[in-house]
Image (cartoon, grey):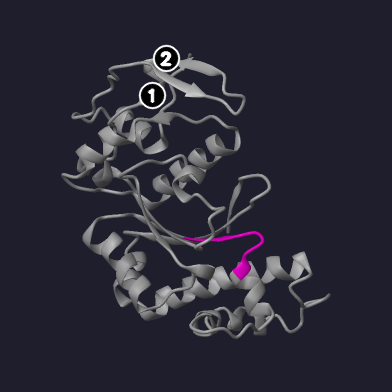
Amino acid sequence: MKRIYPPFVAFALLFGFSGINLSCNTNVSVKTETQDSISIAKSDVINDEFLHQEAQAKLTPDLVLDILKKGNQDYVDDNLTIRNTSARIRIASLGQYPGAVILSCLDSRVPVEDVFHCGIGDLFVARVAGNIANVDILGSLEYGCKVSGAKLIVVLGHEHCGAVKSAIDNVKLGNITALLSKILPAVDSLKNFQGDKTSKNPLFIEAVTKKNVLNTIDLIRHQSPILKDMEDKNEIKIVGAEYHMETGKVEFF
């Protein structure tokens, strides 16, 4: 079987960084939905590779973006690699050098690391319903980039977002009300949308989802001078994307 590396690991191997142990000690047995056992060669199991400081230092925002696009294509094509995450956990405990920060929705149907075919130590992931930004999220993004060296911020919306639908419906419920108020500007900005402006219209949901991603990016730039300065100096890039649940494809825009 052909050995497949996660995108960030492939980058590290390409540049010949040391400290990456490619050996796995045992074969892995996996049970399918029919309870039949299949054997997977040890060479097809990721054991303890993860992104090291030397690799992170050589990354550029555009390269990280390309790596994520390639990883997502692997995900769409079901071209994935099994990982021995317990070994990666032990090594990653000594430090972390992720390539990107993903600001994603809370939705359980958006498995962020899997979507980009990344593993432990590759990504910072901030999750909050509606992929909105507040002071805590901004602080987390600043930590990920300014302190820990990530090169890319992706604000990741997704299809069929419950938070977006709730904002369209103007739901009022406990602390959810305050959260949805951060999505309402995206709804209100689409008054000229041609068609049914309700949560029953998939096209309107799609339009609000994309507008909400762009609004979050604008908020990041306006309310975080640190990140805006880093972007102006080309030290990082801030981009928007949408995860399409029915295909697994991430659309960048």
Q: Residue 5 in the image: state x and y as whole percent.
A: 40, 28
Q: Between 32 and 84, which is closer to the camera in this rendering?
A: 32
* Horizontal relation, residue 107 to residue 246: left or right: left
Of all residues, the one furthest to the right in this rendering is 195
Tags 1 and 2 touching, CB below 8 Å: yes
Q: Would residue 132 appear left or right of 138 to someone viewing this image?
A: right
Residue type of the residue flagged with mark 2: Ala
Amino acid type of the residue that numbered disc 1 sits on in the rendered structure: Val
- Asked if 81 appears above or below 187 in the picture, the reply is above
Q: Quadrant of residue 124?
A: bottom left
Image quadrant assignment for residue 67: top left
Q: Residue at x 70, y 69 (%)?
A: 205
Q: Which residue is drawn at the image coordinates 32% and 77% (left, top)? A: 225
- The image shows residue 106, relative to residue 75, as above or below, that is below
Q: Which residue is mark 1?
A: 45
Front in this rendered view, residue 189 or 171:
171
Q: Residue at x 23, y 57 (%)?
A: 148
Q: Nearer the viewer, residue 118 or 218?
A: 118
- Horizontal side, residue 79 vs residue 62: left or right: right
Residue 41, numbered label: 2
What separation in Å lies between label 1 and label 2 (alpha carbons)? 7 Å
Q: Is residue 48 left or right of residue 237?
A: left
**Most foreground residue, 101 or 177:** 177
Q: Position of residue 253 (x, y in %)?
A: 58, 59
Q: Helix, strand or loop at disc 1?
A: strand
Magenta segment boundaries in residue numbering: 155-162
Residue lying at the far front of the rendered structure? 35
